[in-house]
Amino acid sequence: MKARCTECGTRYSMDSIRYECRCGGLLELVQDFRGVDAEQLKREFAKRLGERHTPLASGVWRYKELIAPELPLEALVTKGEGNTGLYSPPAVTSYAGCRRLWLKALGENPSGSFKDHGMTAAVSHGRFLGFRRFACSSTGNTSSSLAMYAALMGGEAHVYVPEGTVSENKVLQTLAYGAVVHRFAGTYDDGIRFLREQAGELGLYVGNSVNPFRIEGQKSIIYETAQDLSWQLPDWIVLPGGALSNVSALGKGLRDLYELGFIPRLPRVAVVQAEGASPFHRMMEAGAAELVPEPAPSTRASALNIGHPPSWRKAALVLQETKGVTVAVTDEDILNAKAVVDASGVGCEPASAAAVAGLRRLVSHGIIDREETAVCLLTGHLLKDTDAVGAYHLGGGPEALYANKMNRVRL
Ligand SMILES: Cc1ncc(COP(=O)(O)O)c(C=O)c1O
Ligand SMILES: N[C@@H](CCOP(=O)(O)O)C(=O)O
């Protein structure tokens, strides 16, 4: 397996794990699709949809040839991730305001978030290299996912979680899977800096999205969405942005699908940030060449509480290639959109609802036309943050659509 620096182009053989180039740029894996018979692969992907209890039945490993062709099947640490629903509830479509909307419910993954798509790839690769100790910095979902896969292979997880700002549900889930949770004063960004400096010395395999194998696994989100839609993607893909791993993976996956001829054109991509943690949106809006980190990010969508997204350069390239846009939404917008998504029966955590809030704003500002179509990536499950649900429905939340609907009755 080979990797290339996304900034200076230096190539590395990936016989051992490496997260960044000597120049400091992030790496991406180089896939060689020469000799791939795309039509034959498409038939194979369709066939695997009907399989059960084999690694290739996973919504990630179904696409193994495009993700990690060299990894032996026995190395895979998988829990049948992916294979999540794609829904079109009319109430959310009319709230967002575009002609047709699909919600990709990534919260249906085994640990409850989209992270499983990338983490199965990272932990499998770590195991293949002989690692037993895994680590991450996390706002809660990466840690739950890493802890789950590390436990599944009989390894250890060491997770670094900011004190006080992460959903307690996620911390408990991570602990329950047997991880050692290191809490610290600071943000996700401080944890990433610590691991960049110390992971090698401590013999830890890092499962964060600075790891190019994480990104390769996460590409399967767009492969699966495209296959769900018979390889006809809508005009827009709208997703929340924090560390910007998901938009980077989305862009790489779209390039693959286009290069292989699976899709005839690239959809446009919209990245939605929470106003209190929106350094990438501010950079794009200003047309600046460099990202200015936000030293004290703050949003109720705690998964997005990131001030220095490691993948911002990869993300900027994806927006350039897809004629994409960014937008920032308030916490109130996010919680209102979440109430609509929850009441539609699909449900999601606050960070995911940012995608729907962002789509609504982009439609109302005429940036997305009402006649256009979109997929919103709903990245995490409703039960990932029950404090947010309680605050909204039982008082203390913003005044809005479905608030305080609970009755107390005497039977
Ligand atoms: C539920 C959820 N949604 C969205 C995001 C943002 O994704 P990314 O960090 O890949 O931009 C995260 C994590 O950052 C998350 O946990
Ligand atoms: N929301 C994420 C933060 C970003 O993590 P990374 O895995 O992309 O490095 C989390 O759940 O920790």
Image (tube, rainbow, N blue to C red):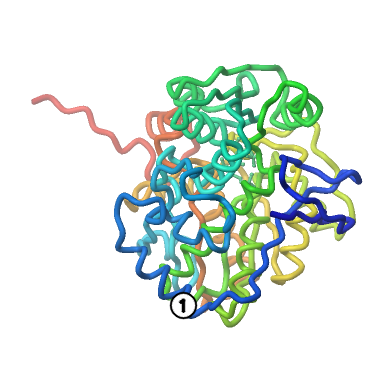
Which quadrant of the picture is home to ligand 2? top right
**Residue found 54% across the figure and 78% down from its top:** 37
Q: Is residue 15 left or right of residue 264?
A: right
Mark 1 C-beta closer than 8 Å to ligand 1: no
**Residue situated in front as seen by the camera: 113 or 163:** 113
Count up the numbered dots. 1
**Residue situated in front as seen by the camera: 399 or 176:** 176
**Residue situated in front as seen by the camera: 326 or 393:** 326
| Quarter the N terminus occupies | bottom right
Give the image location of residue 15, x and y in percent: 71, 45
Q: Is residue 50 left or right of residue 4?
A: left
| Quarter the C terminus occupies | top left
The image quadrant that residue 83 belongs to is bottom left
Relative height, residue 282 to residue 300 (above, below):
below
**Residue situated in front as seen by the camera: 155 or 223:** 155
**Residue found 58% across the figure and 40% down from its top:** 128
Q: Residue furthest bottom?
A: 264
Give the image location of residue 231, x and y in percent: 47, 75
The image quadrant that residue 252 belongs to is bottom right
**Residue found 53% across the figure and 43% down from its top:** 115
The image quadrant that residue 182 belongs to is top right
**Residue found 72% across the figure and 27% down from its top:** 191
Find numbered disc 1 in the image and state the secondary structure of the residue it sits on: helix
Amino acid at circle 1: Gln
Q: Is residue 272 left or right of residue 262?
A: right
Q: Is residue 144 visible from the viewing direction of this image?
A: yes
- Local packing at callout 1 (Cα closer than 10 Å; few below 14, some 14-19, many 20+) is few
Give the image location of residue 99, x and y in percent: 46, 74
Give the image location of residue 396, x and y in percent: 47, 28
Q: Is residue 108 left or right of residue 17?
A: left
Residue pointed to by mark 1: 40
Relative height, residue 113 to residue 410 (above, below):
below
